[in-house]
Amino acid sequence: MRIITKDRNIILEDVKDFNVSQTLECGQCFHFDKIAEDEYGVVNGRNLLHIKQDKDCITCFDIDESTFVKKWVRYFDLERDYGSIKEHLIIADNRLKEAINVNYGVRILNQEFIETLMSFIISQNKQIPHIKKIVSDISEKYGEYLGNIGDKKFYSFPDKRTLEHISEDDYRECKTGFRAAYLKSAADRITSDEKFTDEILSKMSYGDAKNELIKIKGVGEKVANCVLLFSLGFRNAFPVDVWIKRIMESMYFHKETPNNEIMSFAKDKFGEYGGYAQQYLFYYARENGLGK
C-alpha cells in the first residue's frame, strides 16, 4: 500500500484485498453512513473519516497521513496479509473459494470496545438499518459532535463517563425496547469494574474473555463472539446467527444443527482463522439470501 498526499486529502494506492463497501456493509459495524456509491462517513471512537473508493484507488478527505496511520490503519486492519489468510482457508476447505472470491475485499475491523459491545447488544433480533438508526440516535443524543460530511452530522458514541448518566428509560426512548435493560447492565459493568476493559480482556484466553462478557445480562454466545472478533482481537471467534447457521447447515451438515455444534465444528475446521471464515461466509450468505 502506498499513501500519497494530495491537497488536503490522502490517496491509498495498491491496496490489496480491501473493499470499503464490502468491509463496512458486511454486518460487523454500524456507525457509518453511505454518502454516495462507494463513499462513506465512518466513525471510529472520536474520529470521523470521509472515505471513497474508485476501483483500486481509495481517497480519504481532509486528513493528513500521520492522522490516518495513527487512527485508521489499525481500524481497517490494513497491515495484515489477507492474501495468505485466504490461501490458508481455501487449503482448509476448497468450498470456501467462491465465498472468498465474491467477497474478496472484506477485512475484519478493529473497533472500539464499548461501542462494539453496546452495538451488538442492540443488534439482537434487529435488522442492520434499525441497528444503525439506534446507534446514530444514541450518539446524537449523548455523544460528541465530530463534524459534517455534506449535510450529514456525525457524533461519537457516548464514552464511559457519559454512560454513567444514561438511564434504562433513556435507552428505551431511543427505541431499544427490551434491550434497554441489557444496555444499562452493560454500562453498569463498564463503569463500575476497572478490570472490565479491552486492554485486560484482550490479554485473557478466548474462553476466559468470553465468560466475562456473558456475565452481562442479555449477552449470550453470539454477542460475546462478535465483541471478541470485532473489537478484542480474537480472530478465532465464530459468531453464529441465522445467516451463518443456514449456510453452515447447507454446506456441511445438511440438516438442522444446534449452534454449539456449528461453533465446535468451525473451531476444528478453521482454527485460528475462524473469524475470517465467518465473515466471508456471512456476507456470502446474506448477499445470496441463504439466511431467510
Image (cartoon, rainbow, N blue to C red):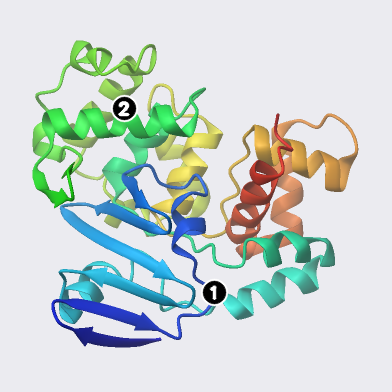
| Quarter holding residue 276 | bottom right
Q: Above or below — where is 204 with respect to 78?
A: above
Tell me the crowding category of disc 2: few under 14, some 14 to 19, or many 20 or more residues within 10 angstroms, Cα based. many
| Residue ID for mark 2 | 134
| Residue ID for mark 1 | 17
Query: In the rendered structure, which amino acid carries the disc numbered 2?
Result: Ile
| Residue drawn at (72%, 37%) of the image | 245
Q: Is residue 243 visible?
A: yes
Q: Is residue 234 visible?
A: no
Q: Nearer the viewer, residue 274 or 213?
A: 274
Q: Above or below — where is 114 with respect to 142?
A: below
Q: Above or below — where is 230 with respect to 116?
A: below
Q: Is residue 164 left or right of residue 176?
A: left
State the quadrant of the C terminus: top right
Q: Position of residue 256 (x, y in %)?
A: 84, 29
Q: Secondary structure at mark 1?
A: loop
